Image (spheres, helix red, strand yellow):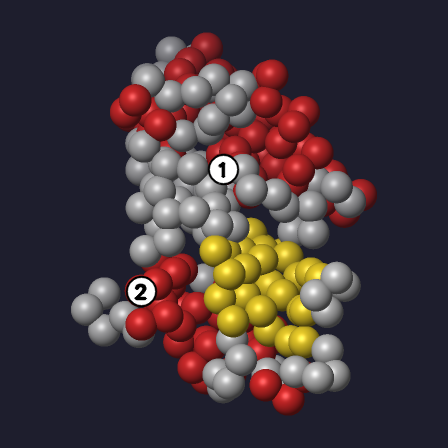
């Protein structure tokens, strides 16, 4: 990332939750900064909250481009981030964002929970953390996908995962679809084993992990 802008570099250098004011920035500049900052996972073990101030009340409204918030969210969506109003500062919310209105300070913000490179597994891990190392990169389940998060969640973490990632009826419905996908996949693998067929490395790794 040799051509990363100053703001993007500052975001990527964050080691704790931080706030960045987008006053005076054009949508094009915002898009570039957000893309450069979040196109790769941040080198962190634990989740942080990155907050962008995209608007303010009457006294400071003119400082912000009216397209600031849309520029942030559009760039994030292009990178595969998903809006989640129930997201919080936990590792399982990586790759999500939400819009907020701070009525106390009269500020409009976009809160981002970036993708991170968890190193917990190399330190012994945590029973409540789904690590990227639980499955190889060639896993049958897409890294960071709902199916992977559900499949690799310990049973004692699953309830909290549903509460944080699926607060709405439509999200719970999506979770049921993901669970059905996992069940069908595992069912196919078990059927092949019963028929005496050997699984390849990716299939065996997934079967063992679940």
98 shown above or below 116:
below
> How many residues crowd mark 2 within 10 Å: few (<14), some (14–19), many (20+)?
some
In front of the other: label 2 or label 1?
2
Answer above or below: position of 32 versus 172: below
Q: Who's the residue at 54% across and 19% down the image?
A: 154
In which image quadrant can residue 54 be found?
Answer: bottom right
Residue projecting furthest to the left: 2
Q: Which residue is mark 2?
A: 9
Q: How many marks?
A: 2
Upstream in sequence: badge 2 or badge 1: 2
Residue 62 x/y as whole percent: 64, 89
Can the viewer see residue 78?
Answer: no
Question: Which residue is tagged 1?
Answer: 91
Instruction: Measuring from the top left, give residue 202's x and y in whole percent.
Output: 33, 29
Say which element carries label 2.
helix
Q: Position of residue 159 (x, y in %)?
A: 67, 25
Query: Considering depth in this image, is 61 or 169 the residue closer to the camera?
Result: 61
Residue at point 52%, 71% (across, down):
21
Q: Nearer the viewer, residue 102 or 36?
A: 102
Direction from residue 56 to residue 81 in the image, left or right: left
Q: Is residue 61 left or right of residue 188?
A: right
């Amino acid at each position: 990332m040799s051509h990363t802008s100053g703001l993007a570099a500052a975001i990527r250098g964050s080691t704790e939750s931080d706030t960045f004011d987008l006053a005076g920035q054009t949508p094009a500049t915002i898009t570039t900064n957000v893309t450069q900052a979040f196109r790769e996972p941040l080198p962190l073990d634990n989740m942080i909250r990155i907050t962008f101030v995209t608007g303010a009340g009457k006294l400071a409204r003119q400082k912000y481009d009216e397209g600031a918030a849309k520029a942030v969210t559009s760039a994030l969506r292009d990178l595969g981030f998903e809006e989640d109003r129930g997201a919080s500062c936990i590792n399982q919310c990586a790759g999500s964002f939400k819009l907020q209105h701070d009525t106390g300070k009269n500020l409009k913000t976009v809160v981002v929970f970036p993708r991170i490179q968890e190193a917990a597994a190399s330190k012994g891990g945590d029973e409540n953390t789904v690590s990227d190392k639980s499955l190889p990169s060639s896993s049958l389940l897409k890294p960071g996908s709902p199916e992977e998060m559900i499949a690799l969640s310990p049973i004692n973490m699953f309830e909290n995962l549903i509460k944080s990632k699926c607060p709405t009826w439509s999200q719970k419905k999506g979770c049921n679809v993901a669970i059905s996908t996992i069940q069908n996949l595992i069912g196919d693998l078990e059927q092949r084993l019963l028929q005496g067929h050997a699984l390849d490395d990716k299939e065996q790794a997934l079967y063992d992990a679940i």
